[in-house]
Image (cartoon, rainbow, N blue to C red):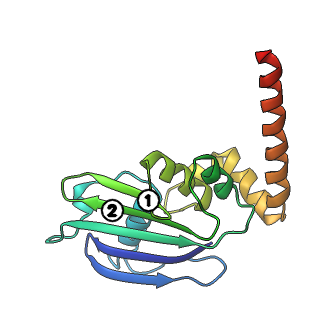
Amino acid sequence: MLAALSIRDIILIDKLDLEFASGMSAFTGETGAGKSILLDAFALALGSRGEAGLVRSGAPFGQVTAQFDLPEHHPALAMLAESGVDASQELILRRVQSLDGRAKAFINETPVSVQTLRRTGALLVEIHGQHEDRAFVDAAAHRRLLDAYGGLTADVAHVESLWRRWRDALASLEAR
């Protein structure tokens, strides 16, 4: 669950800190109220494509930090462990966008590739906007949502662990 979002010097936002309660969150408002700016900033923290135009005028760089509270068997934690990123205490995604177009990505203050940030973000958040239907045809996203709804996240992690052990054992036998 997204627990907090911090935005610094992104588009029109100088400084914004949001904290979220448990449950579903929704942004609503009039056209031009800034919903898209919030989502663009959040997407940056999740690994979307960055660009110099996201940095607020007059600032040397922009930064977005997203903090998540996750159950101990969440698939993102297993993926990060395989990537060598320690997420045992908390999960904080941070992206720094420079005026020159370069961006830096961090997970729990460990520098990571944008691809790792994007893969992690895809396991954490599903953003739906007007006319966006990508997730409705993504079978993996449906399965994750159904597993979470059914309280099966720990069971899924256990089955994945068993499958990896089987795959490693098979590879070891084939190597002989």
Q: Type of residue at label 1?
A: Phe
In the image, what residue occupies the spot 16% across and 70% down?
A: 57
First in sequence, mark 1 or 2: give its number: 2
- Spot occupied by residue 20 in the image (x, y as percentages of width and height): 56, 82
- Spot occupied by residue 139 in the image (x, y as percentages of width and height): 70, 45
Describe the element under mark 2 as helix, strand or loop. strand
Q: What is the quadrant of the C terminus in the image?
A: top right
Residue 96 numbered tag: 2
Residue 89 figure quarter: bottom right
Q: Are marks 1 and 2 in contact (CB under 8 Å)?
A: yes
Q: Type of residue at label 2?
A: Val
Q: Is residue 122 left or right of residue 160?
A: left
Q: Is residue 55 left or right of residue 155?
A: left
Residue 41 figure quarter: bottom left
Q: Is residue 21 visible?
A: yes
In the image, what residue occupies the spot 79% across and 53% down?
A: 157
